[in-house]
Structure formats: C-alpha cells, structure tokens
Image (cartoon, coloured by chain):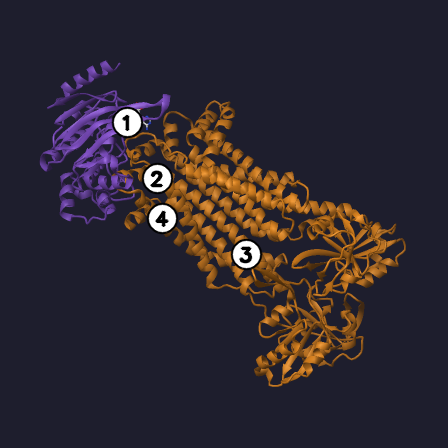
Chain colours: A purple, B orange
Amino acid sequence: MGMDDVVAMDAVSKVYGKGRSAVAALREVTIGLPRGRFTAVMGPSGSGKSTFLHCAAGLDTPTSGSVRLGDTELSRLNETRLTELRRRRVGFVFQAFNLVPSLTVEQNITLPLRLSRTRVDRARLREIVERVGLAERIGHRPAQLSGGQQQRVAIARALVTRPEVVFGDEPTGALDTMTAREVLSLLRETVDGMGQTVVMVTHDPVAASYADTVLFLADGRIADAMDAPTSEKVAARMTRLGAWNR
Amino acid sequence: MIGLVLSTLRHRKAGFAGAFLALFCAAALVCACGILLDTGLRGTIAPERYAGAPVLVTGDQYVHQDKIKKHKVKHKAKALAERAWLPVATADRLRGVPGVRSVVTEVTFPAEVPGATPGSSWGHGWESAALTPFTFAAGRAPSAAGEVVVDAATARTAHLRVGSRLPVSSPIATGAYRVVGVTREALPHQAAVFFSTGEARRLAGRPGAVSAIGVFPAAGESGTSTVAKSVTAAVRGTTATVHTGGDRGRTEFWDAEKARIKLISMGGALGGTALLVAILVVAGTFALSIQQRQREIALLRAVAATPRQIRRMIGREALIVSVGAGALGAAVGPLLGLWLRDRFRALGALPPTLNLVISPFPLFAAVLAAVVAAWAAARLSARRSARIRPVEALGEAALSGPRTGAARILAGLACLAGGVVLTLVLSSLNTEAASSPVTMLTAIVWTVAVALLAPIVARTAAALWGTLLRLSPVGGHLAAANLRTRSRIVGSVIAPLTLMVGLTGTILFAQTTMGHAATAQADAGTVADHVLGPKVPAAAAAALRHTDGVTTVTEVLHSTVRVGLANYGVQGVTPAGLSRTMNLDVRSGSLNGLDAGTIAVSGTAADRLGVHVGDTIRMTLGDGTPFAPRVIAVYGRGLGFGDLTVAHDLLAAHVDDPRADTVLVAGPAGADALRSAVRHYPAVTVLDQATLSKDRAAAGAEVNYVAMGLIIAFTAIAVVNTLAMATADRARELALLRLVGTTRRQVMRMLRWETLAVVATAVVLGTAVTLITLTALATGMIGSAAPYVPPVPYLAVIGGAAALAVLATVLPARLALATRPADLIGSRA
Ligand SMILES: Nc1ncnc2c1ncn2[C@@H]1O[C@H](COP(=O)(O)OP(=O)(O)OP(=O)(O)O)[C@@H](O)[C@H]1O
Ligand SMILES: [Mg+2]
C-alpha cells in the first residue's frame, strides 16, 4: 500500500443485519487504490462489490476497519462532513437514475457545484461537455437523451468538481455493447488524458479489460488482482472464481 | 438552490398539485372562518329605531362577576338572554341633568300585524316616535286606546290608510285597532306599530318599567359626548348603561348582538379545526410526494446534498407552493364567507342586521395559515427525507422505505395518550359550551395518532386482510402482496380516509346522540293529548282553557338564566294540573308547590350546582332581575325539558316575548275543538307528533352541519387527492403488470381489492374514533354511555367513503392504463 493511494482500506468489514440473519458482505478487506489508474472490481453476484464501492466512497460506513480518502479518515466524519467530502473530492456514476429529471443537462452537470455554492468555471464546463460530446444537448432534459448520452452526462457531472476519484457501479450495465464501449472509452480517456483516478464495478469482462488493474471479489474477500487485463483472461478468471464459489 | 427548487416545482407539477389543492382549501376555509370571527369581534350593527336619539340609556345587558386570581381582580361579564328593562324613575332622574333638552321613554313589545315578518314587528308608544324620528305622512297621533299609527312600509304591504282597521296580536291581548296615522318613514329590518301611551304600557305588561330612554342634548348632536358624560355620572350606581354612536345598534338589536358573540366562538372553533385538519392533510400530501421522490432525493444526497440542504429544499418548495395556494385561497375565502353568511341567515343563526366585516386580516390569516400548515408539514416530512440513505440511488435495486422512525412511533403513542386524556376529560364535561370544542379536538387527536402510527396500522391491516384477499386468485393475490410491500404508501392513504370517516361520524352523530336523548326524553315526558304552537298568546291559552273537554292547559315558555356566569336553560310552565300534561320524572321532592318563589332542578344541574330539595339558588333571570327561589324538586328529564323549571307567570314577566312556545292540552277534547278555540290566532296550530320530534331534534343542528360540512368536504378532497396521487405514481408498475400478461381487468380488480381493504381499515378505525369520542360525550352530557348512531346516515358515510376512494383510484388508473405499456417502461429517468 503506497503513499500514492487515493483510497486506502484497512481491515474493512461490513455486516448487514444482526444475529442469525446477519450477512457479512465484506470480510477484513485491506487494499490501496492507486492514483491516476483505472481499477475495475469484479466478482460473482452477491460477492460484495457494491458494498466495497459504497464503503470506499463514503456512501456507507463499514462495521469495522478504516477507510482513508487521501489523508482523510472517513470513519471520523459525520453525515454532513461526509457529504461535503463527497461533493468536493469524489465523483459518482451509477447504473441508472443518475440524473435529476427536472434539471437540464447543464444544470445536472453543475449540480454538485451549486450545492456547494461554488462558482461554475465556464471554461472547465465547456471543456468537459466537449470531452463527453454533449455540447449540443446542453439545454435538454434527461428524458430527451438516450441511455448512453445520460451516462455521459453523469460522467461529466462526476468530473466537474475535479474529484480525486470517480466511482462507478456498473455504469454500463444498462447499455448496449456499442454504447457501453463509447462510455468506457470516455472513462479510459479521463484517466489517460486528465490523470483521473477511476474505480468501476462491473460484471462484464470486456468492460474490465479497459482497466489498468482488475480486483476480483469473492464472498466478501479480495480473491485476486490482475494487471493489464484482457477480456479473455478476465473471463477465464471469473469462470474459475465462480466454480470455486460453488 | 432556489433554481433547483423552481425547476423541481415546474417539472413535478402533478406531485405538487395535491399539496397545492389541500393548502388552497385550507386557506379558503381559514379565510371564511376568519371573516366570521372578525364579524364577531368587530361587526357593527346600525341603529334603526334609535337612530335619532344621540344618547341612549338602557338596562345593563350583562351579568358581572369579579374573579379574584392571585390578588388580581378579573372582571368578567356575560350577556343576558333577554332585554333588561329600566325603572321609569331613571327617566325622571335624567330630566334634571344639565345640557339635556328632553328625555323620551320607550316600551317595546311584540306586535304582529298582517303583512309584517313574524318576530320582527314591534309595538311602541307614540311618545317615543322621536327616537327614530318618525313623522307623519298622513293622519295624527293615537290618543285613544283603540288607535294606532303604522309605519310607511307596513301601510304599503298591508294596504292600510287612515281609517283602516288593523288586527294586532300582542302577548297580552289581540284586538282590532283603527289606523289614525301613517308615518313618512320605515325601518329596514322591522315593522313599527305605535299605540297611545297608556295602551302601549298596558300591552308591554311591565308596569313602571321602560325598555329604553332617549336623551336629546340641548346643543343638538354636537353636545352628545358632554351630555353622555353627565348622563353616565347621573346614573352611576343604578343598572342603567349609556350608549352613543354605533353602540346604540347593539343595544337595539340584542339578538344580533348575541349572534355576534356566538360568531366569535364559532368562527374560532371552526377556524381552529380547519387549521388542524389542514396541517394533518397537507403533511400527508407532502409526505407522499416526498416518498415518491425518494430516488431523486437519494441521488441528490449521493451527489452532494447534505441532509440540511435537502430539508431546506423541501422547506422552500413548501413555502412557494403555500404562498401561491394561500393567496388563491384568500381570494376565494370571502366568497365562501358570503356563502356561509347566506346559509346562516337562511337558518336564522345570523340576524340580517349584523353586517359581515370583510377586512384584510382574514386574508392575511389565510395566507399565514397556508404557510404555517405547509411549513409544519414540510418539517415533519423533511425529517424522514433526511433519513433517506444515499446508497439507495445506486443501481436498479428496489427501494426499501426507511424504517418507521422511533420519533414517529413515540409521537403516535403520545397522541394515543393525549386521546385517552381528552376522552376522560370529555366524559366529565356537562355543559355544551365546553364539550363541543373538546369533542372535535378529541376526534382529531385520535385521528392524528392513527396517522402517525399509519405504517404500523397498514402492516397490521395487510396481515389481517391478506388471508381474505388471497381467496381471489389473481387480483386479490396481487392486492395482498401490494398491501404488504407498499405499507408506507397504504398508510398515507388510510390516514385521510380515517380522518374523513372519524370527523364526519363525530360531527353527524354528536348531533344525533344529543338530539336523540333530548327527543326521547321530551317524547316520553310529554303526556298531554295535544300540543299547540308556536307563539301562543295568553288569550289563546285562556280560550283553550274554556273549551269543553279540556281539563288542563299548560303554557310552556323557554328562556335562559345565569347562575353566577354559567348559562342554564329554563322553562316556565303553568303549575295547575301539570302532572296531566308533562312528566318530568321527579326523583325527589314534588312539583306541587311550584310558584313565584320556587324552582325545580334537573339531576345534572342539581349535581353541578350542588343543591338539594330545600336549598336556595341565587340566579339572574334573562332580563337581569335577580331571583333566589327555593328548590322543591329534582327531576330526571333535564335534556328534554331544560335544566330548570319555574312557574310560567314568573318567567313570562322577564322575557321579551311572553307568548308560550308550546301549549300542552290534556282532556278528551278533539283537535278540531282546539282549532276552533284558537281560530282568532291564525299562527297557532295543533302540532302533530312528527313535526314536534323533528323540531326538537333540528334545533341548532343545521348551523353546525353547514359549518362542519365544509370541513368534511375538505377531508373528502384530501382523500381524493391522496389516492389519486398514490395511484398516478404507479403508472410504471401497472404497465409492467400489463406487459407480463396481467389483463386490464385483472389490474383493475387488483386495484379495487386494494382500495376496498384500505377503505375497510379506515372505516373500522374511523368508527372506533367516532364511538370512543361520542361515548365520552354521551357520558358527560347525558349521563349514559350510549351514543346514538342511526344506521342509514352511517351507511351513507361508509358508502360515501368507499365510493370516493374507488373513484379516486380507478380514474387515475384508467388514465395510466390508457398509455401503451411499452412506452411507459421505455421512458427513462
Ligand atoms: N441493505 C442490505 N441488507 C442486507 N443485506 C445486504 C444489503 N445490501 C447487501 N446485502 C448483502 O450483502 C452481500 C453483498 O451485496 P452486494 O450488493 O455488495 O453484492 P454485489 O457484489 O454488488 O452483487 P451484484 O453483482 O448482484 O450487484 C449480498 O449477500 C447481499 O445480499
Ligand atoms: Mg451490486
């Protein structure tokens, strides 16, 4: 775990429920997510991927263990402080329902800035909007956009605050192959061109192949990591993971 | 932030329409009630008959009492029921006051003439014509006992001119008079018949007393205030009071003045109830709209909004909606106020002489009420919204409603406890003034408890109805599942339905409970063979007494007296042969000694006053005369006949209109014989049993129905509102059901089953609220825990609730199903 990690998790466990119905979604996970890299998180359904992401991003608090974002220890923050941290230092792209339907594309993108009462940097906004290829749709409402375009708006919103890390939970899960590829290329570009750190949960070996590193989760534990992944290698690893799991 | 709020409002018009409508209705109601209250507080009554007398001296229309509280003397005054007369000697005293040009005395008594509205035709002596002033259009002043002068309007309607013969019916006597003069003037709200001074005094029946004294300053109108001061000084120590300006109108129209005082309490109670109901209804609508935006709020939370910012956002939404709705409600409120005025006038609860006051205050109050209701509602629902976890925005996962908060459950339990306390309090209240507001409050507090505990109630209901519903294979099965998983939404629909059923039941059946007990007692206690009424003059009663086959004639007259400051209904009855016409169910003592110095008391009144047979009660009669009779009997049928019973002749001497309200006749004489005995009194008829019971039950109830009917209408709107909101939001879910192969009919059947289960739950709860409240009311007021709920109106309430609920579910569902399912599922975000 190097000093250059954006997120550092130390012995993080998350247990849902109590007593006999308790489910351990994460078991003593210790990992560092390096700065300026694209990390994918894979694993069978129910292996704890979403829980991992929520804990890493400060959306949920672990049952035990510590999570650091940069040099901030998340467990010491209350809900308001966590929110402030999220809006300055973290960006999110969800699988669906990313946008506020009543706001235009531009208003959706600048929402975190408005909520933190930060002035909108027009040049930065234009650059991001162009990068995600939505310069013409800036005044449209989400319902007037395709699924891929909506996800690109979400990415633009995630980037607008210059966050230390962008988290995505199956951001391409609801898209067709072609559209998914566009969105993934866009994420890849932000890493290569802007030095952005991206952490993405996915089911799809092809999506994972866009990452620099793939983490494999199984039964709440990090089972393996793979650098320079290809979709074939990831798929093969997943098959074995699935077999072990059973 | 404000931009976000505005675009949300624009985008989610439908969601806010519900809250807007609820707030609008609340504002209009509060505005109308405010106008009533304002009229009560500041309503002016213009003098008519006394308009020409700059300074008016009358008897004191109030009972006074000083209450000593922590070394502070608090002065309290309560209005008398009848007009207080003055000794004629007061006039002599005023004649010597410096600056006074002349002093004019007046007697007033009912004098019915053909063509004039019954109850607003008054007789006077011609010597008091200057009080208006009346002048001659034709003829001269009456000088003999058989002569009268009539006002211009009466002359016109009854086609009278100098020389005409005019039958006049007054309490003391009925006779034909010769018109010797017609005045130039007429009064807007009353007819005036002038007699010679001596005849007027005789017909007024109060020797040595006058009803008012007009004082004319030597300096004319400009001397009014100085003379008023000297007159006040001159009458100090007597019961006389001095009036100038608009104050004279209140003295002249004592009925209007009493109505004005009543409006204060009615407007306040109605407005307060409306406000409470509004907060409850609006809170429900807001909570529902926030539930429906749960995912959006979760997204905002995840992206960057602090719980505080979410609360603030909801607060601003509420503020904007409420100011708009409040302003619109304030615009409509005065129309509602005018409508209420017309209804009250038609029912005789608001005299035409009392003008509605429409000032800016109720309008501001309406906007303020809307803002306060919305603010309170936003506060309540924002508590929950802040608990929505940001992770809920992630993925497609089904939204788990936040758990029912501990604070909510605690508040619900506190309300339950409050309901118990209020119910106990109510069951110990035995005056109507105290019990009617507490009745409404009790019902509302119970309903608030149900609303707060609604999620738990809904879960329980789902479990109970589940087994039954599953008997229907598709629709029922789906409905059972929906009730279970959507318990939070179901709860927010149950709450307004329970409110509607509970409030409607309480309002309707409080009247029937009280009315039924009174009617039952009156029916059981009236043992006479015939009843005649209304407004029977003494002469008519005498004629009945002399009819063959009549053994007993009991004249019955009603008024109100005050013991201390408390009001007691009193009846005056002819003591002779009373047992043959009226059975008061005497528990102790005997009615045999009823005379001008004795009284009989109902059991409840005896308890309240702490008196027994042989004790003396000090009271103030309706016209302000002190009276200290000895108790000779305690009886059981107080509700049916009044709390106090005195001799008729005694009471008749202390009321404005001494004509009997009813006359009870015993004996073998037939109705035709009685009719012919009273043929000279066309207004008097033989009443049949049915009209009698109806009249007894209806007294005062209609005014309540009109006022409270508005609140019921309001809750009905809330029910439709909430259900429509809840159903319209399910478009996507219904489309999905259609896509997976559920037929339209099955979907509709599912919705109907759901709605019926919800209605059934609300009816059970609402009925429970009604019965608990009314049992307490009956215990306190009647002394027996027996609410009377007539089945037909009750079924109508249930049927109305069910019909409203089904309609408000089925119509939006049809709209939702009209869209092609694929379009709905495909629509994004
Ligand atoms: N709110 C919750 N309450 C109880 N158990 C939960 C909750 N959220 C997740 N779990 C459980 O924790 C485990 C991990 O869930 P998680 O959502 O992290 O899995 P995942 O890897 O994201 O699965 P998928 O690929 O299906 O999204 C699962 O067994 C799940 O049932
Ligand atoms: Mg997941």
The residue located at (32%, 26%) in the rendering is: A16
Mark 3 or mark 1, whichever is nearer to me: 1
Quadrant location of the C terminus of chain A?
Answer: top left
Disc marking residue B293: 2
Residue closest to the eye, B552 or B238: B238
**Are callouts 1 and 4 both on one chain?**
no
Q: Is mark 1 within 8 Å of ligand 1?
A: yes
Q: Secondary structure at mark 3?
A: helix
| Residue kind at label 4, given as amino acid type | Gly
Q: Secondary structure at mark 1?
A: strand
Q: Nearer the viewer, mark 2 or mark 3?
A: 3
Residue B758: % across, % down: 50, 34
Mark pair 2, 4: CA separation: 15 Å
The quadrant of the picture occupied by the N terminus of chain A is: top left
Q: Separation of disc 1 and disc 2 at Cα?
A: 28 Å
The number of numbered discs placed on residues in the rendered structure image is 4
Residue placed under numbered mark 1 in the picture: A14
Q: Label 3 belongs to which residue?
A: B267
Residue found at x 59% / y 62%: B260
Same-chain check, marks 2 and 4: yes
Residue B169, located in which quarter of the rendered image?
bottom right
Q: Earlier in the sequence, mark 4 or mark 3?
A: 3
- The image position of residue B306, as x and y in percent, is 29, 43
Pointer 2 local density, CA inside 10 Å: few below 14, some 14–19, many at least 20: some
Residue B134 in view here: no
Q: Residue A52: x and y, percent?
A: 24, 28
What residue would you read off at disc 4? B315
The amino acid pointed to by label 2 is Arg
Which chain hosts label 2? B
